[in-house]
């Protein structure tokens, strides 16, 4: 949770901060224009805190699903022998350099509790204020006629408001304000009308009508949600002040442009400030908000505010499109073919199927080690597996890791099967014509037909490792033998030996051991032979115990005195593992059934 939450939150905050900075620069360009344009820019900066760019990046990844990654060349056949392969993703830190993240891990409950206390405190303060205004509304009396109602209806017609606003007469000392979002009502203090002449009265009512037309209560409540969630970040409170300032200034401009006298309008606001209390919540739109001195200067300044010309409209439109298009494009260009893209199973494929399939459940091995063996031959298209689980089959068919699987039955990783499948000569010939990246559909068909497997892909931000070439250079033996040759990987406890295999298969096997997706970023495209020996740590040992493998290492085994896995990768292979957080596509298992025997 810490590995995923901390980088994601940090990225979201600096991206939102950068977005707010860009909005602020645009408001400077529009400082001589109408306040409503600046208000919408600040509101966009506020809403950005609720919409992480990672969602748009994930959308770009989804659009990249149709781009299929090339599979490695398996030669004549590819054999994997795994002794008690760990299926449950362990939480393992494999950084070869010192990191401060583990030292902060004990503080995670404290930080979550601190955030929750602040969140509840903000809600408590706002709820108490809302309750006070709500009580004043319940005690208020509807006003059906009179001087105030007549003036309100005239102002509504002048402002183009079709639905009339209900007027409630209150004995409270709160200023006139709009209460509610879906069905706004105007709460009017009982004693204020005696102190206002008709022009003053209409000016105040016109201000409130424009609050309703602009739906200011709705947008203020939206920003209050941002302030509650990110109460610890000063920028959101600063944005709230800018929104309130530009909101009131925008209503002032509308009232003046509607034909109101500047001096009368300024006097009416000052009279309300003299005899009433200001609104305690931003989502209750009143008339006395923001800096009164600046508002008076703004109202009394006889200047014509510019409307947005074509150039500035084009600038704002381009900025909005870039804010959406850039993260989507980033997702399209940075989707990882071998791990971040999983082909949707609903897409029809010309998949040759096995002519005969035998599936038998295996009895638990008891105290004996669980042994998994799989072999897929390109000589005749046969597939044989012993001690294999449905989870292992799904990972092989779709080339994913444990962290990229979600859902499924409770026996997904416990019930083991013995499988023998053979393909007809005609289907085998048809499969041989397919590109390498399209082969493997026969195993997907086996899962659909015999396990009734149904799944769908989703994009999620997950902790991953990037496999990179170390500064000292790769220590791998590239095999250039032409023609057919046997290639494969043999795994044991603390041992991995490969012969003529590409590095994305190494990344797959490292993912299995680390319990986290490892993405090949080395750029090495050849077939290599190498041998890797390491000492499993306590986390890996625990998963080996869970799978029934004796934990005590063989004293004669190289892994008995080997280094940790990350160090072994760096020292023995000249590669390194770096922790990252990427958008990874996950297969969600919707349905699976236990196959009938034979």
Image (spheres, grey):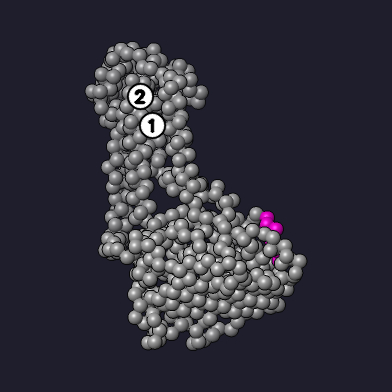
Q: What residue lies at 44% left-to-right and 74% top-to-bottom?
A: 531
- Extreme-right residue of the structure: 426
- Which residue occupies the foreground of this view, 349 or 26? 349
Q: Which residue is mark 2?
A: 30
* Whole-percent x, y for residue 577 in the image: 38, 63
> In percent of the image, x 51 and y 50: which residue is there?
61
Horizontal relation, residue 8 to residue 275: left or right: right
Q: Quadrant of residue 18?
A: top left
Residues 514 and 120: in front is: 514
Q: Quadrant of the C terminus?
A: bottom right
* Residue 21, visible in the rendered structure: yes
Given residues 428 and 444, the one toward you in this image is: 428
Residue 563 x, y percent position in the rendering? 34, 75
Going from N to C along the chain, the mark reached first, 1 or 2, is: 2
Tell me if mark 1 has few (under 14), some (14-19) or many (20+) residues whose alpha carbon lies within 10 angstroms of its own.
many
Mark identifier at residue 41: 1
> Are circles 1 and 2 on residues that touch, CB within 8 Å?
yes
Q: Give residue 101's quadrant in the image.
A: bottom left
Left or right of 584 on screen, residue 485: right
Q: Which residues are magenta?
A: 348-353
Q: Quadrant of the N terminus?
A: bottom left
Disc 2 element: loop
Does the magenta portion include 350? yes
């Amino acid at each position: 949770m810490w590995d995923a939450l901390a980088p994601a939150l940090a990225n979201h905050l600096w991206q939102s901060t950068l977005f707010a900075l860009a909005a602020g620069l645009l408001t400077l360009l529009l400082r001589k224009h109408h306040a409503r344009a600046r208000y919408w820019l600040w509101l966009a900066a506020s809403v950005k805190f609720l919409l992480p760019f990672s969602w748009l990046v994930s959308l770009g990844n989804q659009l990249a699903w149709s781009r299929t990654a090339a599979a490695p060349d398996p030669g004549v056949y590819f054999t994997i022998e795994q002794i008690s392969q760990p299926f449950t993703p362990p939480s393992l830190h494999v950084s070869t350099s010192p990191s401060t993240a583990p030292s902060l891990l004990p503080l995670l409950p404290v930080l979550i509790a601190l955030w929750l206390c602040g969140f509840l405190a903000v809600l408590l303060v706002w709820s108490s204020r809302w309750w006070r205004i709500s009580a004043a509304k319940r005690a208020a009396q509807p006003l059906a006629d009179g001087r105030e109602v007549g003036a309100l209806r005239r102002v509504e017609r002048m402002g183009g408001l079709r639905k009339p606003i209900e007027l409630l007469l209150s004995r409270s000392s709160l200023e006139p304000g709009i209460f509610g979002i879906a069905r706004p009502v105007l709460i009017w203090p009982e004693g204020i009308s005696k102190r206002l002449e008709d022009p003053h009265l209409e000016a105040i009512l016109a201000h409130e009508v424009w609050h309703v037309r602009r739906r200011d209560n709705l947008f203020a409540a939206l920003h209050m949600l941002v302030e509650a969630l990110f109460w610890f970040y000063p920028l959101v409170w600063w944005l709230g002040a800018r929104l309130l300032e530009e909101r009131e200034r925008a209503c002032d401009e509308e009232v003046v442009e509607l034909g109101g006298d500047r001096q009368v309008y300024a006097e009416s606001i000052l009279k309300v400030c003299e005899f009433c209390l200001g609104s305690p919540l931003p989502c209750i739109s009143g008339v006395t908000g923001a800096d009164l001195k600046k508002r008076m200067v703004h109202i009394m300044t006889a200047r014509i505010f510019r409307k947005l010309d074509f150039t500035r409209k084009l600038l704002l439109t381009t900025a909005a499109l870039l804010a959406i298009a850039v993260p989507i494009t980033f997702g399209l260009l940075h989707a990882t073919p071998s791990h971040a893209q999983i082909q949707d199973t609903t897409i029809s494929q010309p998949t040759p199927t096995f002519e005969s399939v035998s599936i038998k459940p295996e009895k638990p091995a008891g105290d004996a080690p669980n042994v998994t063996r799989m072999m897929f031959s390109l000589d005749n298209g046969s597939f044989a597996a012993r001690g294999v689980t449905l989870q292992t089959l799904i990972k092989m068919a779709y080339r994913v890791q444990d962290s990229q699987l979600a859902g499924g039955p409770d026996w997904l990783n416990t019930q083991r099967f013995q499988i023998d499948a053979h393909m007809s000569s005609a289907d085998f010939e048809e499969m041989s014509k397919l590109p390498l990246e399209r082969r493997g559909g026969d195993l997907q068909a086996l899962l659909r037909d015999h396990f009734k497997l149904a799944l769908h892909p989703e994009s999620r931000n997950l902790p991953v490792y990037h496999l990179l070439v170390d500064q000292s250079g790769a220590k791998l033996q590239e095999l250039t033998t032409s023609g057919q040759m046997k290639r494969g990987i043999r795994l044991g406890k603390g041992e991995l030996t490969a012969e003529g295999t590409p590095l994305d298969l190494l990344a797959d096997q490292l993912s299995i051991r680390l319990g986290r997706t490892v993405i090949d970023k080395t750029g090495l495209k050849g077939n290599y032979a190498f041998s890797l020996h390491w000492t499993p740590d306590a986390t890996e040992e625990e998963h080996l115990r869970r799978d029934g493998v004796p934990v005590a290492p063989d004293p004669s085994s190289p892994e008995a005195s080997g280094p940790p896995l990350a160090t072994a990768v760096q020292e023995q292979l000249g590669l390194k593992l770096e922790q990252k957080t990427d958008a990874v596509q996950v297969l969600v298992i919707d349905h699976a059934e236990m196959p009938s025997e034979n």
